[in-house]
Amino acid sequence: MFEAVPVKARKHSHGLKTVYIETYGCQMNANDSEIIASILEGQGYRIVNDFKQADLILLNTCAVRDKAEQTVRNRLKHFRGIKRVNPHLKVGLVGCMAERLKERILEEEKLVDLVAGPDAYRQLPAMLKDLEDGRKAVNVLLSLEETYDDISPVHINSNGVSAFVSITRGCDNMCTFCVVPFTRGRERSRNPETIFKEIEALRDQGYKEITLLGQNVDSYLWYGGGPKKDFDKQPEEVKARAVRFSDLLDEVASRFSDMRIRFTTSNPQDMTRDVIQVIAKHPNIGRYIHLPFQSGSNRILKRMNRQYTREEYLDLIAYIKQTVPDIALSHDVIAGFPGETEEDHQQTLSLMDAVKFDFGFMFAYSERPGTLAARKYEDDIPRGVKIRRLNEIIAKQNAHSKERMQSYTGKTFEVLIEGHSKKSEAHWMGRTLQNAVVVFPKKGKESPGDFVRVKIESTTGATLLGKPL
């Protein structure tokens, strides 16, 4: 499924061109679309939510799984058909898929007019000028410095209550199955002062919740500039002043105590005990951690180049639960990684039994070109076996999710109202600190952005039903 990302149109005296943006993939891609929208609005483009009204169509893409790429290709073929009727229409591919395919999709497959990687968005105006002048428009150069920290994102498709704030870009963890280091480059962190400034602006606009965002937020490290890989070369006085993720999270929660603070995504090898202590310290930090484990087998974790063991992961979980007893946990897991045996699969299931996650994101292994796993390991697990193992993982998670949701029945939570329930205009929908969705009847006085105490009376699947107190 594709997601259109509309924003309220703003007229400009210096330009009437229109752009339509479609976003695929993770929250980082959604945040990037907001950066793109801001850059193009500054050049006089008007953002529209119907591609039929657009002079320029941009697809902001994901390359993590093959299925996502095939969805984008089908969408591009659809737009190519529209271009035959409207030859003035320009179509661009941006994001991770653009970085992976580079010029090939423009020159060989002839599906797009423009190709821009995740670090090239500042160059979009110049690239569009190249198109107008009949030149190629391709920029897939990765950067060691780019964080877009001086750009105020246009919050497209926003509920006006919750927003993402990017704190890192790229990733240095070379997991063998993952394309992110190749499509988003080396890890670099954003100046904390620009982060505070963006959050303050969001608060002034009425936002009540922000999520600190990065491929791996726990490895956030600001020491005055430069990539994380150069930190060890710095003088001791520079190292002493460095801001780590626990420092940033503590400062954000303190400065913005009237807002709810979340973060994603974490990596087990990088999450430190002091981050967990900061969560326990501040009541406005969400009681929810997304902590991918990928496999319950040490043998498979080693093949994945995940820098932790099953035992270390479970020790971290135990410390989290001890320090923050009301925590909710979610995961990522891959079924059918090359070389995975039935015993390895059973170890994944047993780890899930040991933790009992609130929910998870579960996938069958999809070989990605260019990764170490694709070069080194044969994709030797038959698809039928992958699907069967995946279904067993999903069934177990569904059982755990049901158990976790039922455990909330009878308890009272502070719920942040995000908007109307999808099924009833007579009900609100919001989330608890544990990131659980709650639906409850309106009393006539509340509005989106309000915090309301709700007593949970029942649950239907992944949704809690309650009454406001």
Image: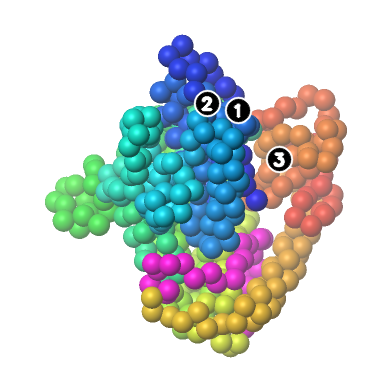
Q: Earlier in the sequence, mark 2 or mark 3?
A: 2
User: How much space separates mark 1 and mark 3, taking CA atoms?
Assistant: 33 Å
Mark 1 and mark 2 in contact? Answer it, CB < 8 Å.
yes
Identify the residue under disc 2. Answer: 18
For this rendering, which residue is in front, 189 or 410? 189
**Kind of residue at badge 3:** Gly
Q: Earlier in the sequence, mark 1 or mark 3?
A: 1
**Kind of residue at badge 1:** Gln
User: How much space separates mark 1 and mark 2, taking CA atoms?
Assistant: 7 Å
Identify the residue under disc 3. Answer: 430
For this rendering, which residue is in front, 273 or 438? 438
Classed neighbour count for the residue bearing mark 2: other residues with Cα under 10 Å, few (<14), some (14–19), many (≥20)? many
Residue 135 in the image: above or below residue 291: above
Label 1: element kind: helix
- Residue 6: x %, y % from top left: 60, 32
- Residue 191: x %, y % from top left: 32, 39
Quadrant in the rendering for residue 374: bottom left
- Residue 399: x %, y % from top left: 75, 68
- Frontmost of labels 2 and 3 is 2
Classed neighbour count for the residue bearing mark 1: other residues with Cα under 10 Å, few (<14), some (14–19), many (≥20)? some
Left-right relation of 183 to 395 = left
Instruction: Write the start and end of the magenta stretch as one range.
Output: 346-374
Identify the residue under disc 1. Answer: 53
Magenta stretch encompasses residue 329 = no
Residue 436 in the image: above or below residue 179: above
Magenta stretch encompasses residue 373 = yes
